[in-house]
Image (spheres, grey):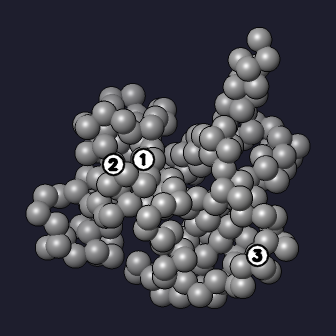
């Protein structure tokens, strides 16, 4: 299995289709009748996001997620949640010089036996990408069970607002300081840190 940035049209369609299958057909969080074709996408996909795709050895999409960049459309977490005062967030987590949001994190139900593996590979690939592009923080609004799972796996997001019923379940808004997270992983979970490919990137830069 590998994780790639979905750049070709076929790869992007695979991401949209997996989102539709999971969010509309399987979970019913969104109405399938709102889409002319079986592809779930929104205003952020028009140029304000970077899609990631996890594919197995046969090329089948087994997971997807995206990074939403700051831009013309306000980040979803800012639009849909009552967050703690910004100054409190900055005091606790550092200056939000370049904050992005991780969104539409989906693992195919058909790959349930590999759920944790796919989750980790997606997370670590996105973490490495974010740090290399100079992002300071990542937001997430996640189902409370998934929020807890991420912390158990070593990917710590801190709650920054009141949970609410959103997208079909109790959802928690969170943030992580990317530099702090990477340093913690390098020290406490070196095998996970290696999955970010940050060490390899540093070696290439120094050579």
Residue under pointer 3: 89
Circles 3 and 1: CB atoms closer than 8 Å: no
User: Residue placed at 42% from the left, 42% from the top?
Assistant: 53
Residue 101: quadrant of the picture:
bottom right
Kindly state the secondary structure of the residue where label 2 is placed.
Answer: helix
Residue under pointer 2: 15
Q: Earlier in the sequence, mark 3 or mark 1?
A: 1
Discs 3/1, front: 3
Discs 2/3, front: 3
Kindly state the secondary structure of the residue where label 1 is placed.
Answer: strand
User: Residue placed at 39% from the left, 28% from the top?
Assistant: 57
Residue 180 in view: yes
**Residue lying farthest to the right in this orientation:** 187
Position of 202 relative to 104 (above/below): above
Residue 136: quadrant of the picture:
bottom right
Residue under pointer 1: 51
Discs 2/1, front: 1
Position of 190 relative to 183 (above/below): above
- Few, some or many residues within 10 Å of mark 2 (<14, 14–19, 20+): many
Name the quarter where the C terminus is drawn. top right
**Residue lying farthest to the top in this orientation:** 207
User: Residue placed at 44% from the left, 64% from the top?
Assistant: 72
Position of 137 relative to 134 (above/below): below
Residue 60: quadrant of the picture:
top left
- Few, some or many residues within 10 Å of mark 3 (<14, 14–19, 20+): some
Position of 115 relative to 27 (above/below): above
Residue 110 in view: no
Q: Position of residue 144 (x, y in %)?
A: 59, 76
Q: Earlier in the sequence, mark 2 or mark 3?
A: 2
Q: Is residue 84 left or right of residue 112?
A: right
């Amino acid at each position: 299995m590998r994780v790639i940035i979905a750049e070709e049209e076929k790869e992007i369609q695979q991401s949209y289709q997996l989102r539709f299958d999971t969010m509309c057909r399987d979970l019913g969080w969104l109405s399938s009748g709102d889409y002319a074709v079986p592809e779930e996408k929104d205003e952020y996909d028009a140029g304000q996001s970077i899609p990631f795709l996890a594919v197995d050895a046969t090329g089948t999409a087994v997971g997807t997620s995206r990074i939403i960049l700051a831009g013309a459309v306000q980040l979803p977490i800012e639009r849909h949640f009552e967050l703690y005062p910004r100054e409190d967030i900055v005091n606790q987590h550092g200056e939000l010089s370049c904050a992005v949001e991780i969104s539409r994190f989906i693992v195919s139900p058909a790959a349930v036996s590999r759920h944790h593996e796919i989750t980790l590979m997606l997370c670590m690939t996105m973490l490495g990408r974010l740090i290399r592009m100079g992002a300071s923080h990542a937001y997430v609004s996640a189902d409370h069970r998934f929020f807890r799972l991420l912390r158990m796996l070593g990917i710590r997001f801190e709650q920054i607002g009141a949970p609410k019923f959103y997208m079909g379940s109790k959802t928690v808004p969170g943030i992580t300081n990317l530099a702090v997270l990477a340093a913690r992983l390098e020290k406490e979970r070196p095998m996970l840190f290696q999955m970010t490919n940050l060490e390899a990137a540093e070696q290439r830069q120094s050579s």
